[in-house]
Amino acid sequence: MTAPLLRIRGLTVRYSSGPAVLDGLDLDIGAGECLALVGESGCGKTTLARAILGLLPRHATVTGTVELLGNDIGHAPAKGRRALLGTHLGYVAQDPYAACDPIRTVRHHIEEAWRAHGAAVPPGVVEQRMSALSIDAAATRLGDRPHQWSGGMLQRASISAATVHDPELVLADEPTSALDAELADGVLHAVRRASRSLLLISHDLRLVENHADRIAVLRDGRIVETGRTGSIITTPRHEYTSQLRTAADSIRSAPRPAADSYRPSATPPVVTIDRVSVSYRSGTAAIQALHDASLTVHAGEIVGIAGPSGAGKSTLLRIASGIEPPESGTVTFAGGQASAPRGYVMPVFQDPVASLDRRWPIWRSITEPATVTARLSRPERLRLASEALARVRLGGLDPHRRPGQLSVGQCQRVAIARALIARPSLIVADEPTASLDVTTAAEIIDLLRLTRASGLAIALVSHDEALLAAVADRIVRIRDGRTGLSA
């Protein structure tokens, strides 16, 4: 047998004096292979990727060996390891916004893949690569800053930058979590073509099933099962693997709300968006994000919003939340108000890490909305935060931790806890389960279903139409900034 491309033995990682995040982990990846690493949020998937790349924080304690092409990169000096990044080892980060400098253009971030190694950027190649990843008007849009792109668009830019040198191995950490199913499938095909081997970190078992040669299941820092994709999916040996599969199926097989289960309230809608238009500048060009788009949400109703990446879904939610005013059209809230009262609308953003103040312990972020209407002592806020964390399946998490100490999936659950604690009339949720493992996603969906019994309205954006069909009373489709008929 040939030696594995990547060989990991006894890898253990601890942060400060806490428990082991990775505990004696062994893993091999063969040349030309796509290995999928699956497991619940916080189980150590991202830590493994960072350990391979040498990107762990200084306070992390690491033991064990990591070998690439027979060379021990786990103990290599920083300069030697940096020389591998991009040329031999590509990386697609889970959070594309955090991976980008907000004052640099998207073009700069992709071209840096050449400049970091002293190479010239081939003329026209950046535009070609982005067009191949379904970015329309790529030559114009590459001059935008990262915040002007949707999460799905920016993730495709990160994928392009990670694969420009055809590296032997690409580590892709949830590379398609912000993409619709059709685009995600095409993007992963592109990643596989551009990389000789792939470590695919994902919670999307359907996506893994279509692209991985083998699957490794990670739980609490240990590999509990490894095998060929077909056998893992159809006949898992470990009970935990079976639970992940069952949870994935439960989201999509749940019966859609019955046609007579929801009756629009006789009171005015929670929010009414009527023929609004929004455009953004991209250099000298104008990008039409919304064009005469309309949306109405009633109390106790869950409205799903579906459409391809870049269609205007996030912009529509920002309009509904009052964060952004429209250029034309009207937005009215209950009682005909042109602006929402404080705490009336709570957002759950597409980028959960950036939505939390990195300097604050999470208890402060979670309970901040509750202080709008009441003065609360620190002990009271800690109690409320602990209760809110328990509702989103983070009961064992220390509320004094900061966002940088959490996984992206954990940050998303913290953001959902913060939204619910305000007891708003409307939640606008932008891909609230995109960063979550299937088990947690199923529980969050159940939680959203229960909250509408109190009259809470939810506008829910997701690229996962099967999930929307299972949870939403109506589905509004949007394409090229135009809303269509409800489903």
Image (cartoon, rainbow, N blue to C red):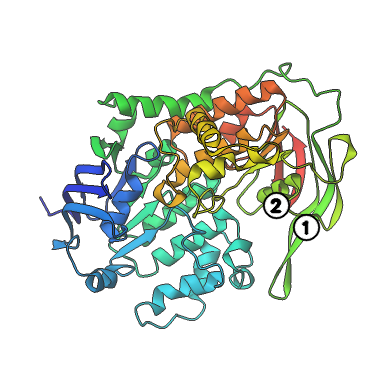
Give residue 245's position: percent from left, percent from top: 39, 28
Under mark 2, the amino acid is Thr
Vertically, is 356 above or below 378? below
Q: Is residue 432 left or right of residue 58?
A: right
Residue at the spot 50% in from the left edge and 50% down from the top edge: 360
Q: Secondary structure at mark 1?
A: strand
Q: Secondary structure at mark 2?
A: helix
Residue at the spot 19% in from the left edge and 63% down from the top edge: 73
Please identify the quarter of the rendering in which residue 53 is found: bottom left
Give residue 173's position: percent from left, percent from top: 39, 51
Cβ atoms at labels 2 and 1 below 8 Å apart: yes
Residue at the spot 61% in from the left edge and 33% down from the top edge: 420
Specify the quadrant that holds the C terminus. top right
Residue at the spot 38% in from the left edge and 41% down from the top edge: 208
Give residue 183's position: percent from left, percent from top: 53, 50
Under mark 1, the amino acid is Val
**Mark sitting earlier along the chain (2/1):** 1
Identify the residue under disc 2.
315
Q: Is residue 338 left or right of residue 349?
A: right
**Residue with the most extreme right position:** 336
Q: Nearer the viewer, residue 116 or 292?
A: 116
Identify the residue under disc 1.
278
- Distance of label 2 from label 1 (alpha carbons): 8 Å
Q: Nearer the viewer, residue 61 or 451?
A: 61
Count of residue discs = 2
Vertically, is 168 above or below 22? below
Q: Is residue 133 visible?
A: no
Give residue 425's position: percent from left, percent from top: 73, 33
Q: Nearer the viewer, residue 42 or 29?
A: 42
